[in-house]
Amino acid sequence: QVQLVESGGGLVQAGGSLRLSCAASRPIFRFNAMGWYRQAPGKQRELVAGASSGGTTNYADSVKGRFTISRDNAKDTVYLQMNSLKPEDTAVYYCNAEETYRGSPYYYWGQGTQVTVSS
């Protein structure tokens, strides 16, 4: 059983920065990809940023140029550096990991960490 533990959320003023961390219970290089999703009240969960094992990254248009995802294989941790935060970034942020199991993708999720950006 894989565990993903997020940390680093909190309350920050608009324009500020936060760094989220996601620590995995097994080597992250074994995952096809890892990413960060978020879910605001009354909205669907959406992809914020993803990073493949090959180093490819992708971002939601709303965070491009402000957020950066990175992987530290030595620490089995994925980070999300969030700069120039806006009130609309307020959400619960979830870490996600994808692996292939019996030929099909299988996903793991963390418990989520709250990010609140005040105006």
Image (cartoon, rainbow, N blue to C red):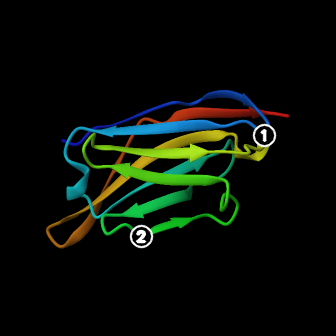
Q: Position of residue 25 (x, y in %)?
A: 23, 38
**Tag 2 residue:** 56
Task: Please name the amino acid that badge 1 sits on.
Answer: Gly
Check disc 2 and give the amino acid type. Answer: Thr
Extreme residue in the bottom direction:
103
- When the figure is inspected, residue 13 is found, relative to residue 24, above or below; the finding is above
Coordinates of residue 83 in the picture (x, y in percent) = 67, 45
Query: Residue 106 vs residue 42: left or right?
Result: left
* 45 is higher (above) or lower (below) than 94: below
Tell whether label 1 touches label 2 (CB within 8 Å): no
Among the 4 quarters of the image, the one containing residue 107: bottom left
Q: Residues within 10 Å of mark 2 (few under 14, many from 20)?
A: few
Q: Which is more toward the observer, 28 or 95?
A: 28
Residue situated furthest left in the rendering: 102
* Mark seen at residue 15: 1
**SS class of the residue under badge 2?**
loop
Q: Tell me what residue is drawn at x 61 percent, y 36 percent.
A: 18
Q: Residue at x 52, y 58 (%)?
A: 49
Q: Is residue 34 visible?
A: yes
Q: CA distance from mark 2 to mark 1?
A: 27 Å
Relative to 86, residue 70 above or below = below
